[in-house]
Image (spheres, rainbow, N blue to C red):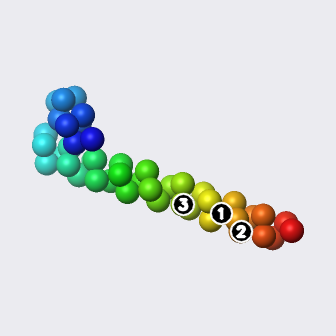
Amino acid sequence: MTETFISWGMDPNWAWGVATIAGILLIALPLMLAVAMIIYADRKI
């Protein structure tokens, strides 16, 4: 993913940081949404 940001003209250090944050968000956001849905379903049942 870093290469993509570098090809867009971003500085390699910034590209690495943005790619790292994007990777963390790609993992964390679906997990947080799944937990929220499980809690919601648990309270409704």
In the displayed orientation, state which residue is furthest to the left.
12
Question: Where does the N terminus fall, quadrant-wise?
Answer: top left
Mark 2 neighbour class, 10 Å CA radius: few under 14, some 14 to 19, many 20 or more? few
Q: Could you tell which of marks 3 and 2 lies nearer the N-terminus?
A: 3
| Residues at circles 1 and 3 in contact by the CB criterion of under 8 Å | no
Mark 1 neighbour class, 10 Å CA radius: few under 14, some 14 to 19, many 20 or more? few
Judge from the rendering whether residue 22 lies leftward or rightward of residue 29; answer left or right: left
The residue where tag 2 is placed is 39
Q: Which amino acid, mark 3?
A: Leu
Q: Which amino acid, mark 1?
A: Ala
Element at label 2:
helix
Judge from the rendering whether residue 18 lies leftward or rightward of residue 32; answer left or right: left
- Residue 45 lies, in percent from the top left, at 86, 68
The residue where tag 1 is placed is 36
The residue where tag 3 is placed is 31
Q: Which amino acid, mark 2?
A: Ile
Q: Could you tell which of marks 1 and 3 lies nearer the N-terminus?
A: 3
Cα gap from disc 3 to disc 2, whole angstroms? 12 Å
